[in-house]
Image: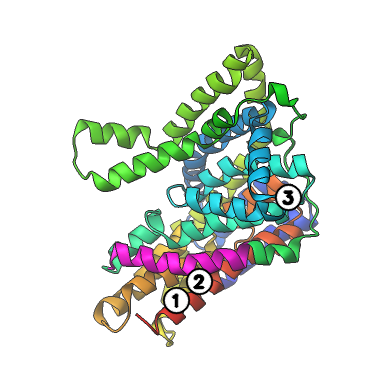
Amino acid sequence: MTLLIILFCIILLVLLVSWAKVNPFIAFLIVSLTAGLMLGIPLDKVTKSVQNGLGDTFGKISIIICVGAMIGKLVAVSGAAQKIAEVLVNGFGIKYVQWALVVVGFIIGIPLFFETGFVLMVPLIFSIVYKYKLKAVYIGLPMLAALSVTHGFLPPHPAPSALVVIFHANMGKTLLYGLIIAVPAIIIAGPLFSRTVKNITSTPLATFMAEEVPDDKLPSAARSFFTALLPVILLMSATVYLNLDHSTGSFHKFIAFIGDAPIVMLISLLAATFILGVKHGKSMKHLGIIYADAVKDVSMILLIVAGSGAFKGVLTDSGADKNIAAVLQGFHMQPLILGWLVAAIIRISLGSATVAGLTAAGIVSSMVLHDHTINANLMVLSIGAGSLAFSHLNDGGFWLFKEYFNLSIKDTIRSWSLMETVISVTGLIGVLILNQFV
């Protein structure tokens, strides 16, 4: 019954947004309340459940999205994005620029949360798209595939790291096996799959589009790359230090504080304000206008992603994940396939990759811990792959891609949703192949 209710709510969401043309944020509120009531949340608690789910998601991403948009807008209007695009294209050639972005996406995806990496890298994608008149989806999808793979497969991301602990797996082996699977998954779901969506027309967010700056007024390549990649540098440095130093002293706490994504974004914005703004003759008043325009452009995206959090919160509070788990526990099949399937079903139903991974782990953990013939490291990767399956309207990542790239729901499913599914299936196949050798 729970699965039928969730299916009904997803269909209702699709109809409200695509057929009735209801604003997606409003549609999420309607569907979240409907789902809560149908799943048995008491009338006096359903509104609170919606508010908690929305607030939890909003609190996690609001600083990252808003400050990231400000940095992206400044990088665009200052000419830094133009300079970065020129350097990349001159280095790799326009023919291989996709591969350049894949490498960048993979490197920054290892230490960064998906949403953070997405917000930081989208301006870079758009700068190349605008300058060289390329197709945004075709150019951008491979980089985002790299970000998604690292998010789902590789520690130190939260879900894979938590699964390693749950299954008593080995962090180093999981990372090694994950890298072996990640490379073909990125290639297949990125540069190869993107050829099938080459004709999708996209007009990305105008906030990252700027008039071409004369060469003599462009910031240097060093300043441009440093400003755009400073968040990545800070986050990677903090991650490496915290993984090596397990003390609890004041300096460790200080690094943990300044290495937190919102703080990193704020530091990076201040640096960009000085390097690309004040030093280039822009007044603080003018910079304030740039930042205000950037936030206006992403405000609806922020609300839509928060709305998806409200839906996820209602499903979690109602116990839908546990009900789905109870149904799936009766399945009898190869354990690695079962782990993938459980995670995939919960991901498609609830939208959250992290919730899907952790819930699936709870279902199959006793099986893994008591059957030593099951490779715990591969189970982590199998569930991680399943947790990425078919991102659609109930997932915040779906709306980030749709709104930033300014696509229809149909084209978003055709590109983003299928790309995520290709990653998921490729990951499962990789796990099953590795299982024959390790």
Under mark 3, the amino acid is Ala
* Quadrant position of the N terminus in the picture: bottom right
User: For numbered disc 3, what is the local secondary structure?
Assistant: helix
Relative side of 265 to 289, left or right: left
Q: For mark 1, what is the residue?
A: 431
Query: Image quarter for residue 378?
Result: bottom left
Q: For mark 3, what is the residue?
A: 136
Q: Residue at x 58, y 15 (%)?
A: 278
Residue 318 visible in the picture: no
* Quadrant position of the C terminus in the picture: bottom left
In reply to whether residue 189 is colored magenta, the answer given is yes
Under mark 1, the amino acid is Val
Badge 3, how many Cα within 10 Å: few under 14, some, many 20+?
many
User: For numbered disc 1, what is the local secondary structure?
Assistant: helix
Is the residue 192 above or below the residue 99 in the image? below
Residue 247, image x, y percentages = 19, 41
Is the residue 391 above or below the residue 297 in the image? below
How many numbered tags mark residues here? 3
Q: CA distance from mark 1 to mark 3?
A: 32 Å
Magenta residues, dominant SS class: helix
Magenta residues?
169-190
Is the residue 202 above or below the residue 222 in the image? below
Residue 185 visible in the picture: yes
Callouts 1 and 2 close, C-beta under 8 Å: yes
Residue 388, image x, y percentages = 53, 64
Q: Earlier in the sequence, mark 2 or mark 3?
A: 3
Relative side of 88 to 364, left or right: right
Is the residue 281 above or below the residue 150 in the image? above
Under mark 2, the amino acid is Gly
User: For numbered disc 2, what is the local secondary structure?
Assistant: helix
